[in-house]
Structure formats: C-alpha cells, structure tokens
Image: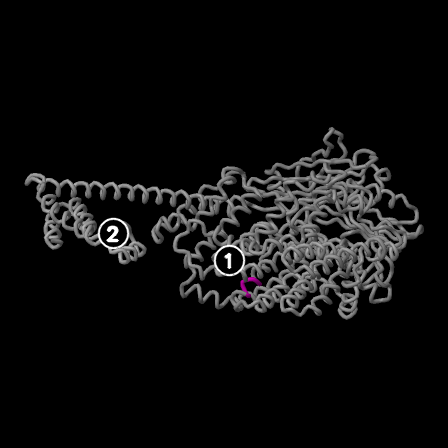
Amino acid sequence: MERLLRFVAAFEPRSARARHRLRLRQAAGQNRGFRRYGGGYGPRAQDQSRQTGAGGPERAGRRARAAQHAPAFAGDRSRIGRRTARPRARTADRSRGAAQEMNSSRRSASTALGAVALLAVAGAATARVCFDVVATDMVYFLVRASETPRLVPLAGFVALFELLLLRVKPRRLLEVFAPFVLVLPFLPFPPSVNLLAAYAAAAGLTVYRAALVGAFDGKSARQFTGRLPLLSGLLTVLMCALGVLASKLAYDRLFLTMSDWGIYTAMAWNTFHGEILRGTWPVPDFSAGHFMPGFFFPMSVVFGLLPSVFTAFGCGALALWGSAVLVWLFARKRGFSRPYAAAFGLIWLLYPSVSNLNYTLFYGVNAIVSFIPVFFGFYLLYEAKRYKLAFLVFLFSLTLKETVGIFWLGWGIVSFFEGRRRDGVLYGAIGALYFLLAVKVLIPYFAGADYIFYGQFEQLGGGMTDILLSPFTRPGEFWGQVLRIKNLQLLVLLLLPVFPGALNRPWLLGASALLLGFNFVRGSEEIVNLVLQYQVETIAMFTVALVLGVRQAKASGRLPRLLAWRLEGAKKQNTRLAMTAGTLGCAFFSHVFFAETFYGKNNVGKIDGFTNAQEEVSELKKIIPPGVKISAGQQLAPQFLFRNTLYGEQRPEGEFVLYHIGDDPISVSLEQHRKNLEDPALAPVWSRRLDDGRTLLLFRRGADLPRLRPYGTVRPARSVLPPRPAATEDGIRCFTATFLPGENGGVLVRLKLLRKLDAFPRIYAQALFPDGRVFRKSFFFADAAVAPEQLPVGATDEFTIPVSPEELANSEFGIGVRLLP
C-alpha cells in the first residue's frame, strides 16, 4: 500500500505530494522524527507499550484506515484540476524568484551607491588634510588653512578613490572604508585639529579592517614586513641625526633659550666642578627649584668628558628617538617576532610628542626625557619577572624629578585594580611619600625656600592640602579647569598614535591620569599642549600599553569585535596583525599632521624666520674673554655654555651684560633696557642688528669706557627716488626717508630724524612687488643703543632693500614708526 501511495503522489502537483508525504508519515506512525507508539511518542511510550501490550492493534487499525483513504484522496481531483495546479505552482515560483532577484538588485544598487558616497568622502577628506591644511600649531591646537578649498586636488582624490571600485567589490569597500564616517561632522567646516585627528583615526581603522580581511596577506606585504627591522633601524639612526641637526639649526639662529636645557646643562657642568646641584642662571639657586640628582650626577660626568652643546643635543636625541631600540627589545621579550617588534619601534619614532620634545617649544630638550629609557628599562625587567632589579630601577627613576613620584602613585593605583595588589600598594605608597619628602623637606632644606611651583596653583589654595581638597572646597575653579575642551583634545592627540592597540589594556592608560590632572589645573591653559615636557610619562606609559595590549589581543575580545563590526570574512588569526597595522597607520598620519619635523604640517621651517647669528656671536667671543662672568639674556646665554660663568641679564655679577631687544616676547623689556642705558656703571660697547628685527647689545661695567654711537649725521646725497615721510599712526612725522644707490644694485634707505623724541622709535618698512614678492623689515633706530632723549635732530640710520630702484618704484612701498616707551 505504501508503494501505491508513493506512485500516485509522484504524478500529483507539488502541494499535493507534500500532503501525501504527511499522510504517509502519519500512516507509518512517524511525526517530527519520533516513532509513535500507542498513545504517546518517544522511548517512554515505547517502553510503556512493550510493558502493557497496548497500542499494537490500534496502530494497525490506523494504518488500514489510512490505506483505505489514500486512493480516494489521490483520485479525488478532476482532470482539469490536475492540468492547472502545476502551472500555478510554476507561476508562483517564478514570481517569488523575480521578487527575490529584484530585492537583490536593489540591495546591490544601494551598496554600490553607498560605496561611491563613502569613497567620495574619503577622497574629499584626504584632499582637504593634504592640500587645504597649510600648517598646524600644537601649542594652541590651531590649523592654518588656505583661504579657499583647492578644487583640482579635491576632484583628483575623489576620482582616485573611486577607481577602487574597478578592483574591489562595492560591499567590501563599504565595509573596509566604513570608519571614514568619523570625518563627516568636520568635513563641511574649515579645517581644524579635530578634522585631522578624525582623519588619522579613520585611516588607521581602515587599515585595521583591511588587514583583518586579508588585504596584507600577499607576497609583497610579506616582503615588506620582512624588511621592517632594517627600516626601523635606519629610521632610528636618521631621526636621531635629524634631531641633532634641528637643534643645531635652532641654536645657530638663537632660537633655543637658556631655559630649560641650558640651565640643566650648566648645572651639570657646575656639579662636575664641585658646585653640587647649584646653578647661577638666572639667579644662584639649588637644582632649578627641582630635586633631580638622578639626572645631574650622571650627566655631570658626561659633560665633564665631552663639554659641548652637541653632547646635550646628542643625549637628548638618544633619549627620545634612540628609545625605539628599547621598545623593540621590550616587544621581543614579550614574544613578538622581529617584524612586529620593528613595527612597535616605528610607532615610537612616529609619535608626534617624541619629535616635539626635541625643541619643547623653544626650551630645548628637558631633563625629564631621561625618564623614557629608564621607564622602558623598568618594564623590560618587570615583565621578565626580575622584580628586584626592576624595583631598583623604580627607585632610581624617582630621583630624576620629584614629580615622577606622582606618576608612580597613579601606576600603583592602576596595578592594584589590575590584580597586582602588592606591587600597586608598594610602588604607589613609595612614590607618594617620595614626592611629599622632596617638596616638603629636601627642596626647602637645600634651596632655603618653599617649593616654587605652588604659585601655579594659587587659584586652588596656598599649599598641598588646599590643592588636594580643591575638588570639594573650590569645585568651580577645579572642575572648570579640568573639563576644558582643550584638555580633551590633548588626551585624544596623546592617545591617537597608539590607537587602537593600546585600548586592549585600558587600565594602564590611566596610570598618568594624576600627573595630567595636576597639569590641567595649573592655572594656565597654555601649558596644555603637545610640545611641553609634561607629557613625557604619559607617552612612555601609552607605548608600553600598546605592546602589552596587542600581545593579549584576541578576536573574541570586546575591542576587536567592536572594531570588526559588520565586517564579513574577518580572519581571526589576523587580529594582532590588524591591531599593529592599524596603530601604525594612526601613528603615521599623526606624525605627518602634528610632529615637529622638516617635512610635515607642523614644520620646523618656522625657524627660518630667525637669522643665523653665528658671525655676530664670533665677534662677541673676541670681545669677551673666556672664564669671565657674563650676565646674559635668554637667547644669548647658551652661546657661552662651558666657556663662561653665566648669570641672568639683571644680575650684577657679570662683568659683561649681553642680551637682545625686539618684538619677540623673550627679549629684554625696554624698561629694563632704559635702566641699563641710564646706569653710569654700564657702557654700551657693541650692537648688531639682525635681519629678523632683533638687536643684540653688549654692555661692559666701567664708568670710564667710551660709549657706543650707532647713528650717523646728515650727509648730502641725491635721492634716486622721491623722499618719503615716516610717521606714526597718529600722524606724527618723525623721519624723512631718502633713497640712495646701495650695494649689489640695491637701494639704500637713509632715515633722518626730524624732531626730539622721548620714546624708542621702531621702524617698520614693507614693499609689495607685482610678482608677489614681499620685503619686510623692522628695527630700532640707532639700535636703541642710545636713550631716545639723547638722539640729536638730524641723526641718521640706514638699511638696504635688495632690489633695483626701478623695481622699488613699481612696488607698493610704505614706511612707518612706532614710539615705544
């Protein structure tokens, strides 16, 4: 009977066959894969039927009834019904297939349009950050951009990104480039630091997702990674050399100031000669207000053996970029292969803060950068479970600077919550106690005064207790400073070069939170930037968190799963590769945008605006004998390191007084300069005017010395161009400008004083030429080497414009005067 039912069902429509199969299963006593026994299903019913013997006859009766009804069911359809049922089923199948095909086409079209739009966003963002952004400022987090967007690069980059559609499926491009939605909130507005940070993060995450789906699994990618160790080593040497070169260029142009690198260098030099931890510039003091024996004692030996400014530049470069070797070694000790370790070394080299700390604005390499190699050495020992040696390195690091104790307190708190409770309590307690000991006992004892940096927190209170309780006693001042937007921007910029790898160890990122918090509430928003030394401990900790974070990264972790959201075909075995490659991408773009280099947006070319003054310094060294005491200003004092004993320009100890005046904020004030001119014990003996507007002045103590007279008298001459008046903004006519033939075909501009003055006259000249060239010059009349009241009417001064008289006549030339008291 079952064979007959199957034979009949074979000639029926599909729906009828399905019903026959159901009847067959019912007739056979089957339902959902279980055999039916008696009144129940499953093994329990089977056992029950076997025990009672029930169900057998009933089951046979049901089979018989099913067999009787089956032919009637099969033959119940008419001939017309059998002919029309099958075409209806086929029509329904075709309709469902067409609908599915239409939906699939719609989804494909939507995916393609989404990929086109996303690639256009990526191309437009790339064009803006590459061409519209001219320069960045990491002190105030500002961006200087072109006045109008450059449409040709914009269209070119959009087209270039769209070409990817010819090689890669739209769905894959949509998945990989999805992070570029991060730039959308900033793209319609003028370029800003926020746009650059969002672009760097989006680019890094795009690299991460591309690596996760196997984009870098090819032969060429393997060859590149095989060369990473060599590339990392070469770049380490190159960047150390570039760092020394950049420091030398800034030194020659009087860009680097005596604070801070010069102070620490002079103090180490004094320590070598027996003046232990004592300095003389700007005033005689102890350890520049800090307690740093761990830096001064080793460096005193180094400077004693190699007394040169190049020693300071070289040691700074090794502590900064040379620490990439320690990062590489640390990664190797944690089990990474050579290419991975080299990649971590590259990330350190690309860290913007590392490059920025070479100049530290204009203060030079700070002594605290010595913490970087010491901290990496600590982690090399600590993670290798050589705890005793690591503890000794920890104790030594405290002596580098008293504020390091605050960092170790934060590290101890983090370690406690990560499960290393004994180490957390031990290291944190020792760090906090050492900081309190240094600022409350050691510094007041040796310096004879309280910790000088309390004044930076005066808005929060007058002492350590007031500062610590300020979140509760003065919540407005405290939280108002902590929650500033610039603080958040700084945290993003510090984290960006190690993103996303370091986020696998989020607790470690909080180790420097206390130290950063103190800097946030120091009263000045200007110290919250990416160039000063207050970020040293943070970047070292973030780099360690990167290596340890990538080491423990797993595809099943929260962060990898979040970053691979809606990414099909992700390879779990590529998780560490993707983390490293993505972080390297973020670090690269951060370096281009924010690092102070010869080639990036934050370019060191700004020092080109400062004149190389080594010829003038050579003249000064011929006048000032070695070994004599000098009272020198910020920018000239470093030129006499290791040669003379240096004091501040206002100190009376120096036989010579040397400084500069100008428009820059580092110059000596005109009030102080006037006092020196009026001091009968000081005589101006030398002055030079630099092309950048600064004037160098040298005084010597002695009432009987001849005084400098840096101005001329009226001489008859024929002007090659009509004379012009030089007046103040108020219309006070002070000078007449006469144009004479100058050297090398230039124009000599002679200024003649027309009236008595009671303020220092500063001259501003500018010429705009038709071809776009600009000539600008500013200087003090007579180098301000004479009190303005002593300038006679008819006194003259000169400067040269390096163009022909015809070119100057066709230019827009103007000359003005400002009277500065």
Badge nearest the viewer, 2 or 1: 2
- Residue 662 falls left or right of residue 552: right
* Amino acid type of the residue that numbered disc 2 sits on in the rendered structure: Gly
Above or below 731: residue 28:
below
Q: Which residue is mark 2?
A: 38
Q: Which residue is mark 1?
A: 579
Residue 421 image point, x, y percent:
67, 59
**Toward the viewer: 259 or 174?**
174
Residue 89 image point, x, y percent:
16, 42
- Residue 189 falls left or right of residue 62: right
* Amino acid type of the residue that numbered disc 1 sits on in the rendered structure: Met
Q: Can you see residue 441?
A: yes
Task: Give the residue furthest to the right.
Answer: 704
Kind of element beneath mark 1: helix
Q: Residue at x 39, y 46 (%)?
A: 159
Mark 2 Cα shell of 10 Å, populated few (<14), some (14-19), many (≥20): some
Is 214 part of what is drawn in magenta? no
Task: Give the residue furthest to the left.
Answer: 79
**Toward the viewer: 523 or 753?**
523
Task: Give the residue furthest to the front.
Answer: 52
The image's colouring method is: one colour
Task: Give, as a single range, the part of the protein colored magenta.
Answer: 341-345
Is 344 part of what is drawn in magenta? yes
Labels 2 and 1: the sequence-earlier one? 2
Kind of element beneath mark 2: loop
